[in-house]
Image (tube, rainbow, N blue to C red):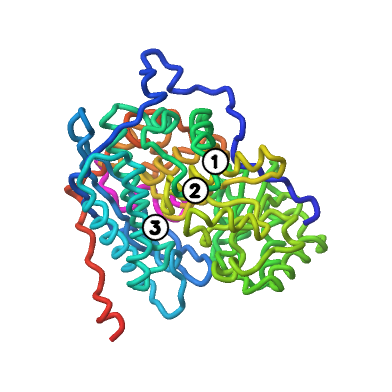
Amino acid sequence: MAGLVPAIHVSLRPAKNVDARDKPGHDDLHRTMSVRLKLRDIAFFERPVQFARPFRFGAITINATSQLFVRAEIEVEGRGTAIGASAELLVPKWFDKRPELSPAQTVDELRRSLEIARGLYLARTGFQTAFDLHASCIGAQIATCAKKNIPALAATYGTAEIDKAILDALLRGVESSFFDGMAANIPSIDARLSPDLSERDIRTFLSGRMPLQRVAIRHTVGLDDVVEGEGGVVDPRENTGARYFKLKLSGDPAADAARLTRIGKELDALGRDYKVTLDANEQYADLAALQALVDRLEHDATLRPISTRLLYVEQPMPRDITRQSPLGSLAARGFIIDEADDSYDAFPAARALGYRGISSKSCKGLYKSIINATRAAKWSAEGEAFFITGEDLTCQAGLAVQQDLALGAFIGVTHAERNGHHYVDGFGETPIAEAQAFAAAHPDLYADAGRGIRLSIHDGDLLTGSLHCAGFASSVHPEWSTLHPLAQPTPIQEQLA
C-alpha cells in the first residue's frame, strides 16, 4: 500500500514510567515469586446488556446480549482462601460464524464451553501453579468441545474466562498487583505450550515489562454507524478525542472502497493527526478479493487519506481459508490474524503465511496473549517487524475493560480498540451502586459528566494508574447478589429438531 505506516504496537524496550515496583514498600519477593493454589469452586453468572446502538460487524448485527461473570474460589498454599472474578460479553456469531447456526446457538456454545472447562478445572484437586492448571486443561478442553461440534475459538473462551478469575484470586491472595505479579511470573508461565520459545525468552520478556501509563483508544466505526454529520466519525461526542480509528469492512471491495473514501474525507477534517486500521471479520472470500481491495488502496487517489495512514488490516479472510492461503506478494503489507488465532501455534503458522501481527484479546486467553507478545518481541529483535495489537470485542465498563486494559498495558499495546463504551450506554444494566463502587475505586477510569458513569477518556487515552491494585486490575468485584446464574444452554437435541 502506498505510504503504509509501519506498525509496531508492542513496546519492545521498557520505557521510563511510573511503576508500582518502584513505589516504597514494594515486596522484592514479588520479582521471583511462584505460588501454588488449589481450586475450590467456580461459579458462573450473567447480566443482560442492551446496546445503545446497533453494532454490525461482518454478517451480524448485535443489539443486545448478556455479560458473563465468573467467580473463582481458591486456596493459596500457606496463605488461606481468596476470591477472584472475571467478566466478558457472550458475543454471538464471532467465535463461531457458521451460517447454519443462529446467534442464540453460538451463545449457547459459549455457555457449553464454560461448563466443560469448569468440569476439567475442578477435576484437578491438588496444589499447582495457575499456569499448570491452564496447561493441564487446555488440550482436553479443545478436544472435548470438538466432540460436541464446538470450534476451537469458542472452546478457548471457557478456559480464558476461568483463568482470569483464578489469576485475580491468586493475586489477591498474595497481595500483588497484576503488573507486579506478571513481571514476577507468579502464575509460573513456561514454554510447554510454545516449544518455539525458551523458558528464558518468557522470563526475560516478563521481567522487563514496564506497564504503560496511558493507552490510546481506537474508535470503532461499525458498518451501520453514521459517517457524516451529527453522530458521524468526526463528531467529538462520538469519537471522544480519538487519534486512532478502526474501520469495519464488508468484504465487497467496491463497496468498501466507496465507504472508506467517505470516511477518509471526514477524518481529514479532524484537524489532528490520525491513524486507521481495517477489520474485515473474515468477510473477504479469498486472496483475489483481498488483492482487489489492496489495488484500490494503492492506486485510487480518493483513498489516500486512508491508505497513507493505514497501520494494518485485520483478519481479512475466513479462518479456514487463512490457514490455506499464503499471502504471497501481499505479505509486504501489514496483515494480522484475529479469529484465526485459536491455538498456541496460530501465530507461528500465520507468520509462515506472511502475517506480521496477531490480536490480543483477554477472551481468547491472557496467557496466549503474553506468549504471542513474547514472540513478537523476540522475532522483531531478530530483524523483522512483528507486532501484537489490542482488539476489543467483549469488554464492558467495569471488570472486563479493566482486565483487558491492564493486559494490553503490560505487554505494551499502545493503542487499543475500545468499543464497549461506544455501543453500550456507560455501565448499561449494571446497578448504580455497583457502577459507583467502580468509579470510586478507579477515579482515573470513570467519571459522570451528566450522562451517568462511563469511561473517562483523557485526550484520547485511558489511564492505567488505578489498575496498580491488589488483584487483576480491579479493587472491587461485581455485586454478586444482583446477577443471574448462567442460563443453561438449550439441549443440542432440541436445537437440531
What residue does disc 2 label? 194
Residue 246 location, x and y as percent? 59, 54
* Image quarter in which the C terminus is found: bottom left
Of the numbered discs 2 and 1, the one sitting upstream in the chain is 2
Evaluate whether residue 443 shows in this view.
no
Residue 228 shown in magenta = no
Q: Residue 374: which disc? A: 1
Q: Which residues are magenta?
A: 420-433
Foreground pick, 274 / 368: 368
In-image side of 273 versus 207 (left or right): right
Of the numbered discs 3 and 2, the one sitting upstream in the chain is 3
* Image quarter in which the N terminus is found: bottom right
Q: Residues within 10 Å of mark 1 (few under 14, many from 20)?
A: many
Which residue is found at the position 24% from the left and 54% from the top?
Answer: 44
Q: 225 above or below 422?
A: below
What residue does disc 3 label? 156
Q: Marks 2/1: CA distance?
A: 10 Å
Locate residue 354: give its quadrant: bottom right
Which residue is found at the position 34% from the left and 31% from the top?
Answer: 34
